[in-house]
């Protein structure tokens, strides 16, 4: 029965993602709002609803490790696995706004969470600061998008849609698509997470590891399905913006609101401070140079992201089992990952400089 709910949850996630992307894409045409802003707000916040529900519920139940692990693990999953798979489907062109504004904000929010957690707790005051930041960020995006040319955005979508979505009935239909898609995403994610947690508990995994792996992957399935399907449909701004927007929403809204509503805030384990949150910061930092060198996430970068996630998950599972080769594996990863990443970034930067100097 647990396996049946697991499969049913995955099916609902895929269907919901397709409906959500279709509705959000057409809505951008009717409202004259860029697909990047839609990806950073409506789609990103909607697909992060499972993280919100799980983290708040875990906070109220006193499962602080699960609440924090869900956010940190989801952010790592979003960048490494989701962007990795999406880039393998089709190289992703990155908007300049992401490089100049949204990714630096994601890095700053990640560092802020680490600093707030140094006393082993994200307090209610910390939560208010985080949640207030996401409100300000959302208003800024909406205000900025209104300055864009509605005509230019309409022209961008005329090539895909035979008619503009400028009628009231069409707009209501698009909104209905988004609502139905979100409902299916949340329901499917709920079934998947509940089933996965039962399996993980049966295997004897710790609460933090469950949050960082099973729950994080389960609640991030909407983002995975949405971004991969958006990439297949050519909506690459939504594919990338969804990931960055979801990470910001997780850090600012999900963790912020969980800290505000929890009786004593969200406690931060030493293990998370020493390893998992720094990994989340490192993952956010690696986005900036990769995004900047040509504003493109290549298939090679996507494959490297996937390798990083597999290595990270393997380390967590080995640590949970206290594997005798854990220390050796950790050293091997450090001495392999850092040099490979540096070489990759230098190569990408060199190729980008050459392409800039080559006359067209």
Image (cartoon, helix red, strand yellow):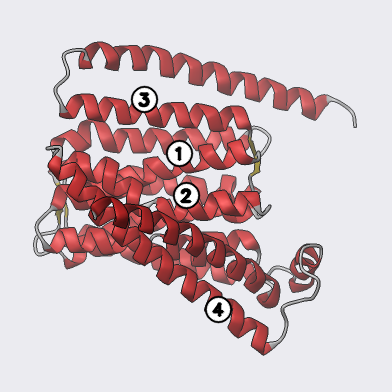
Mark 1 vs mark 3, CA separation in Å: 11 Å
Q: Which residue is mark 3?
A: 311
Q: Which residue is mark 4?
A: 175
Q: Pointers 4 and 2 in contact (CB under 8 A)?
A: no
Instruction: State the SS at label 2.
Output: helix
Quadrant occupied by the C terminus: top right
- Residue 54 vs residue 4, the one in the foreground: 4
Q: Earlier in the sequence, mark 1 or mark 2?
A: 1
Verify CB contact (< 8 Å) between mark 1 and mark 2. Answer: yes
Secondary structure under tag 3 reads helix
User: How far is the residue under mark 1 from the one under mark 2?
Assistant: 8 Å
Q: CA distance from mark 3 to mark 2?
A: 19 Å
In 3D space, how far apart are the residues under numbered discs 3 and 4 (Cα atoms)? 40 Å
Earlier along the polypeptide chain: callout 3 or callout 4?
A: 4
Q: Is residue 204 left or right of residue 330?
A: left
Q: Is residue 137 left or right of residue 199?
A: right
Is 48 left or right of 275, judged from the image as shown? right
């Amino acid at each position: 029965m647990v396996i049946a709910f697991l499969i049913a949850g995955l099916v609902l996630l895929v269907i919901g993602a397709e409906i959500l992307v279709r509705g959000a894409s057409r809505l951008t045409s009717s409202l004259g709002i860029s697909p990047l802003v839609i990806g950073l707000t409506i789609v990103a916040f909607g697909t992060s609803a499972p993280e919100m529900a799980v983290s708040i519920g875990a906070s109220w139940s006193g499962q602080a490790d699960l609440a924090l692990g869900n956010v940190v693990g989801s952010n790592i999953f979003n960048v490494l696995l989701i962007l990795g798979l999406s880039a393998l489907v089709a190289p992703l062109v990155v908007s300049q706004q992401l490089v100049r504004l949204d990714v630096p904000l994601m890095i700053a929010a990640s560092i802020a969470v680490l600093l707030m957690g140094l006393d082993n707790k994200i307090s209610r005051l910390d939560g208010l600061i985080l949640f207030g930041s996401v409100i300000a960020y959302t208003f800024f995006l909406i205000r900025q998008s209104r300055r864009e040319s509605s005509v230019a955005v309409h022209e961008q979508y005329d090539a895909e849609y035979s008619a503009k979505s400028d009628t009231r009935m069409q707009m209501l239909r698009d909104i209905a698509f988004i609502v139905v898609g979100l409902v299916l995403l949340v329901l499917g994610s709920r079934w998947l997470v509940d089933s996965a947690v039962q399996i993980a508990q049966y295997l004897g995994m710790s609460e933090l590891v469950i949050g960082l792996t099973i729950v994080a992957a389960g609640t991030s399935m909407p983002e995975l399905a949405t971004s991969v399907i958006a990439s297949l449909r050519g909506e690459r701004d939504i594919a990338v913006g969804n990931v960055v927007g979801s990470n910001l929403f997780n850090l600012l809204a999900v963790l912020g609101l969980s800290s505000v509503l929890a009786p004593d805030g969200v406690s931060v384990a030493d293990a998370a401070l020493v390893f998992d949150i720094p990994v989340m910061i490192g993952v956010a930092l690696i986005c900036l140079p990769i995004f900047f060198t040509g504003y493109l996430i290549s298939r090679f970068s996507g494959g490297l992201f996937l390798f990083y996630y597999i290595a990270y998950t393997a380390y967590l599972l080995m640590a949970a089992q206290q594997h005798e080769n854990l220390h050796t594996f950790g050293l091997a990863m450090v001495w392999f990952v850092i040099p490979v990443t540096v070489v990759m970034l230098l190569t990408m930067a060199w190729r980008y400089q050459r392409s800039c100097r080559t006359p067209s």
